[in-house]
Image: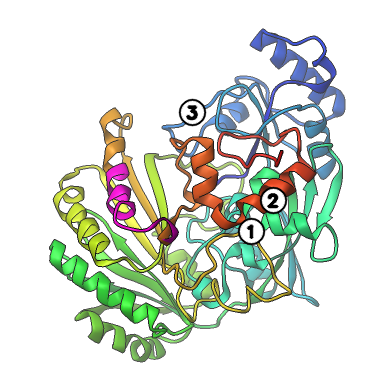
Amino acid sequence: MWLPLIFLTATAAPILANPLTSPLNKRAAIDDCLKSAGVPADAQGSSDWRADVNPFNQRLPYTPVAIAVPTTVEHIQDAVSYASFGLGGENGHLVVELDRMSKVTLDKTTNIADVQAGARLGHVATELYKQGKRAFSHGTCPGVGVGGHSLHGGFGFSSHTYGLAVDRIAAATVVLANSTVVTASPTENPDLLWALRGAGSNFGIVASFKFNTFAAPSQVTAFQINLPWNSASSIASGWGKLQDWLAAGNMPKEMNMRVFGSPGQTQLQGLYHGSSSALRTAVQPLLSTLGASLSNAQQYDWMGAFTYYTYGGTVDVTHPYNTVETFYSKSLVTTALPSAALNSVANYWINTAKRVSRDWFIIIDVHGGPKSAITSTITNSANYTSSYAYRAPEYLFLYELYDRVNFGSYPNNGFSFLDGWVKSFTDNMKQEQWVMYINYADPTMKRAEAVGNYHRGSLSRLQKVKAQYDPNEVFYYPQGVEPAK
């Protein structure tokens, strides 16, 4: 999950000529710079510091040199002006924590929402619905920050119908490496807008977005279908039938769904944009294809459905946010699986995953297909461009593989479990049949491997945009795009 954090190295520009080797001296210099510029910052060791430094994934703790908590664009500018190099994933950086900037304003004439980049998804959804019964595409976890989520994709239970969160970005206000503020839109800095729509953590700090919204449906239906995938052969057979049904264009545009597999069950879960009676009619061909039955169908209004898929969690989440987990995760985006991959993945599911006692799950989002708004000609038309690299309709599935422990540390021998499961896919597919999804980042990959897997066909152009807007890699992180040489 991506939280609204930006990490900048702790080397302050005024002292570059005389490097500070002591972390204490470095911290003092940064603190003085922030204080003199009037940038709010957490006091070292305070309750705010402890809350802001505490990572969502407890497996990946980092110690920043300072934490800025801006409430204005000018504060972000001043923080950037005192940083000379870099963006997160390691110790010793200046963290720019954006979650005090969470305002959401809907223009009821244009239906465009102005959203500050520190807002979390549940708060954005709540405000859009409250202000005008509007919505935008997003995931189901209310605590995820809108910034990282939308800048790298943003899949959810409206994506097949309306596209990804990234597809709703109309414009962005961005603080660049030289601390200037620019607008990225189709008419201003369009190359930057293209790059932000898919790889946005590389080029600046987005302070706010303008999102195109859609009218929240008055009726939506949450549904589950229990899948009889109890053996390797039943998984391979059922998955094969599902992907054939999807590739043939049989999934209605109003249907949004995923396969959810865990130690205890395997289900199709989803949200149909329409009434429960319409869902029952629309889903029947799929049920017949899979030999399955509808186990649950519950009709809600838009926010009721969001609440349903939080499984009892708070929807309208703002600062402070203290939910944490300890986990390892990986991602994939694939075409339909060839038979060798189907059999390999299914055998691994039954013979390896089912024997792991930790709290793991696999989510297989229905991403592509002929009727998907993600891969349709609408988002690929001349007046819409983005660097999101998985637009081909053949990219049917988006995966999150997730393995967590509820107590203690993640075991050192646990990584091979998900690594092996991903290998069971990729060893049996051609290179062009799979990629990876940066919103489920795997920090174990080296930089070249990561950017290649995340950005593929967009990478060369992204490197050129990086060279234009951040040639000195002020916004560096270990898996970031390098500037073209």
Circle 2 — which element? loop
Q: Tag 1: residue type?
A: Ser
Give left or right: position of 264 versus 479.
left
The answer for how far apart the CA atoms under marks 1 and 2 are is: 20 Å
Residue linked to disc 1: 387
Q: Tag 2: residue type?
A: Ala
Image location of residue 26, percent across then percent down: 71, 14
Q: Nearer the viewer, residue 120 or 292?
A: 292
Mark drawn on residue 61: 3
Number of disc labels: 3
- Residue at left offset 64%, top offset 76%: 214
The answer for how far apart the CA atoms under marks 3 and 2 are is: 23 Å
Residue 353 visible? The answer is: yes
Provide the residue span drawn in magenta: 418-432
Give left or right: position of 171 versus 371.
right
Sequence-first tag of 1 and 2 = 2
- Residue at left offset 31%, top offset 36%: 415
